[in-house]
Amino acid sequence: MVSMASSELLPPTPAAKSALHTVPTGVHDQARRRLIVALDVPDRASALVLADKLEGTCQWFKVGLELFTAAGPAVLEPLLKRGHSIFLDLKFNDIPNTVAGAVRSVAALGVHMLTVHASGGPAMLAAARNALEGLPGGPRLLAVTVLTSMDSAQISAVGLDRAPAAQVDLLARMGIAEGIRGFVCSPQEVGTLRALTGPEGVLVIPGIRPVGALSGDQKRVATPAGALRQGASYLVVGRPITHAPDPAAAAAAILAEMAEAI
Ligand code: C5P
């Protein structure tokens, strides 16, 4: 069983705090604070319909490339106003100066976590980290190690002659050397990364599939309970919730499984 110090959880915004006061405390509340639902939808209206369906069940939403490109920063406002926590997953990968500027722009949006690709290299990671330094209450910076959709064949196709786990290990060590303490990795590497980062590391884990769910394009997957037991701080779940006939019921079932594992 993996317990999580409260310092590993991001402090909720004032609006989120008041929203959290209305939900029960205990393991169910802890589970709720650690589940991030990926709003991978094509427009603002669909995102808000989904958020409505999950209101009261889920605290965190991930806004990624599809929704942010279509709807822009304005889509964040109604979610933040309702007290939700936002993981803005744009996975920046560019020259250090450009990434630093993009990270500063994200910080101004009031979101709670953001991503850059660790494969952008040490100088880029340092620039991203420096861009957030001195910003009180700024978002948590996460470095994406190897996408959960990449298996050995995909990795060798981009010229890397190593297993996914070895590449994740290399990128995480590089990130830690640059002062990064938050990572995105697959459930299969979370145990190794937890050992590398210690309890203060924030490990955000996609590729989550409840038993019986379709894996889709995800290659390195685990169940919600399995990922938590390996040391995940947060679970990112998209299609198993968003494509379910009743998204709130699907989320509630995942939260119940998480609560058992906490
Ligand atoms: O639908 P599904 O549960 O597979 O969604 C997973 C989400 O996590 C997607 O939004 C995807 O962009 C994101 N993600 C991922 N692998 C990473 C980083 C983020 O699948 N390494």
Image (cartoon, helix red, strand yellow):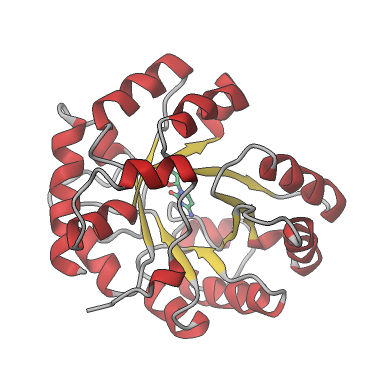
Residue 215 at x, y percent in the picture: 27, 47
Residue ID at (62%, 66%): 160
Direction from residue 21 to residue 88 in the image, left or right: right
User: Where is 245 relative to 108, above or below?
Assistant: above
Residue 76 at x, y percent in the picture: 53, 30
Residue 70 at x, y percent in the picture: 57, 20
Residue 246 quadrant: top left
Residue 23 at x, y percent in the picture: 22, 46
Q: Can residue 192 be seen in this view?
A: yes
Residue ID at (36%, 60%): 220
User: Where is 69 relative to 166, above or below?
Assistant: above
Residue ID at (67%, 61%): 119
Residue ID at (49%, 36%): 63
Question: Residue 163 or 252: which is nearer the viewer?
Answer: 252
Quadrant that contains the N terminus: bottom left
Residue 123 quadrant: bottom right
Q: Can residue 85 be seen in this view?
A: no
- Given the current orientation, which residue lies at the most extreme right position? 97
Question: Residue 139 or 242: which is nearer the viewer?
Answer: 139
Question: Residue 153 or 237: which is nearer the viewer?
Answer: 237
- Given the current orientation, which residue lies at the most extreme top position? 45
Quadrant that contains the C terminus: bottom left
User: Where is 232 relative to 110, above or below?
Assistant: below
Direction from residue 94 to residue 89 in the image, left or right: left
